[in-house]
Structures are given as structure tokens and as C-alpha cells.
Image (cartoon, helix red, strand yellow):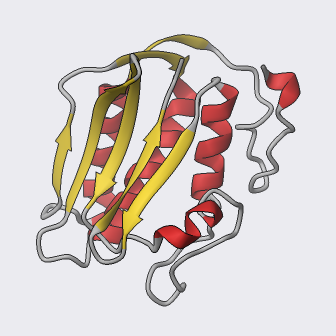
């Protein structure tokens, strides 16, 4: 699998595209809850309503999957915090017999015309004065999900929120 995907060049010191993977059963919910606890401490998100599936074990590299969740949940947190009742959700649905995980928020959203730019490094759909960031997070997410043999995609509506989906085999 890894030979067909060129290495992702991320920020200095980033090894998510070339590091050896340690794939084993991983508690997705525990990883997500740890990320959310950290966000509540560092981003002051006591007013963010967080919902999460009750349980989800996946076969993945836990270290890399934590990077995925950090990027997705941090984005959801960032883009929804200006709303009067910010909501962030980690969920799971099924499509054609495959589990599809998602992180959804009710934040800034995006114009679906530009969905292809979302996963490109350094491509941003919001100005840096609106929301800080480098524009690299979703590119890293896609790279890690591809390394696991999965896919990632997004849906959004301006001022209503966004949902980032991903699959893991």
C-alpha cells in the first residue's frame, strides 16, 4: 500500500508520512476524548457541546490516528467556537457495509464548490484574520488515512458547519 502513495512532506520534523506504522486494535473514542479534554483545557471550550459514539475500536496506528483526531477535532472546535451554541461530534455511520467515521461541527462551514482545495497543503477557505491556521491539517489527515488504506472527504454549508468523513479498512 505505502509504495503507491508518495511521502507527504509536512511541517519540519513531521514523520506521519514515512514513519513505521504500528497497526493494532485502537480505541478511537478514548483517543478522541483525550483530545477533547486537552481542547477544553487549552482552548477554553467549556461551552462547546461534544457528542461522541459510545464505542469504536479500529485497527490502526494509534499514534497516527491521534494526529488525525487532533486535527479534525481542533478544526471543528476552532470553526464552531464563534457560534452561540457550538457543537462538535465524533460519529459513525455505515455505507455499503463499511464503517464511516466523521467529525461534524455547526461552525463556519465552507462553500462546497471549493471542497477539492480542503485537502491540499496550505490551501485555506477562510482568511487568517477570521480563523488562525496554516492550512496543513486536513492534508495531514488525508495522508494518514490513505496510509491506512482508507479515504477522507468533506461536506459543508457556509455558516452551518462542516463534516469530515473518513474510513479505515
Q: Residue furthest top?
A: 24
Vertical side of 134 occupied by 149: above or below: above
Give the left or right position of residue 70, taking residue 56 as reference: right
Give the left or right position of residue 7, taking residue 88 as reference: right
Residue at point 30%, 30% (across, down): 93
Nearest the viewer among 117 and 14 is 117
Residue at point 76%, 37% (across, down): 17
Nearest the viewer among 26 and 148 is 148
- The quarter holding residue 64 reads top right
Residue 71 seen: no
Is the C terminus in the top left, top right, bottom left or bottom right quadrant? Answer: top right
Q: Position of residue 28 (x, y in %)?
A: 37, 26
Residue at point 77%, 48% (across, down): 13
Q: Position of residue 4 (x, y in %)?
A: 86, 28
Q: Position of residue 130 (x, y in %)?
A: 44, 86
Residue 23 seen: yes
Is the N terminus in the top left, top right, bottom left or bottom right quadrant? Answer: top right
Q: Position of residue 66 (x, y in %)?
A: 48, 35
Vertical side of 25 occupied by 28: above or below: below
Give the left or right position of residue 163, taking residue 160 as reference: right
Give the left or right position of residue 78, taking residue 122 as reference: left
- The quarter holding residue 107 reads bottom left
Amino acid at each position: 500500500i505505502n509504495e503507491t502513495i508518495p511521502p507527504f512532506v509536512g511541517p519540519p520534523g513531521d514523520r506521519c508520512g514515512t514513519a513505521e506504522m504500528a497497526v493494532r486494535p485502537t480505541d478511537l473514542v478514548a483517543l478522541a476524548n483525550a483530545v477533547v479534554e486537552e481542547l477544553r483545557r487549552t482552548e477554553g471550550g467549556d461551552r462547546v457541546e461534544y457528542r461522541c459514539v459510545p464505542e469504536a475500536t479500529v485497527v490502526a496506528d494509534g499514534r497516527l490516528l491521534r494526529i488525525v483526531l487532533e486535527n479534525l477535532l481542533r478544526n471543528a472546535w476552532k470553526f464552531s467556537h464563534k457560534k452561540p451554541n457550538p457543537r462538535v461530534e465524533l460519529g459513525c455511520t455505515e455505507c455499503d457495509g463499511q464503517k464511516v467515521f466523521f467529525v461534524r461541527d455547526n461552525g463556519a462551514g465552507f462553500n462546497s464548490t471549493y471542497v477539492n482545495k480542503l485537502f491540499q497543503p496550505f490551501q485555506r477557505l477562510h482568511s487568517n484574520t477570521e480563523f488562525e491556521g496554516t492550512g496543513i491539517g486536513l492534508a495531514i489527515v488525508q495522508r494518514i488515512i490513505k496510509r491506512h488504506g482508507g479515504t477522507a472527504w468533506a461536506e459543508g454549508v457556509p455558516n452551518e458547519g462542516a463534516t469530515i468523513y473518513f474510513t479505515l479498512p
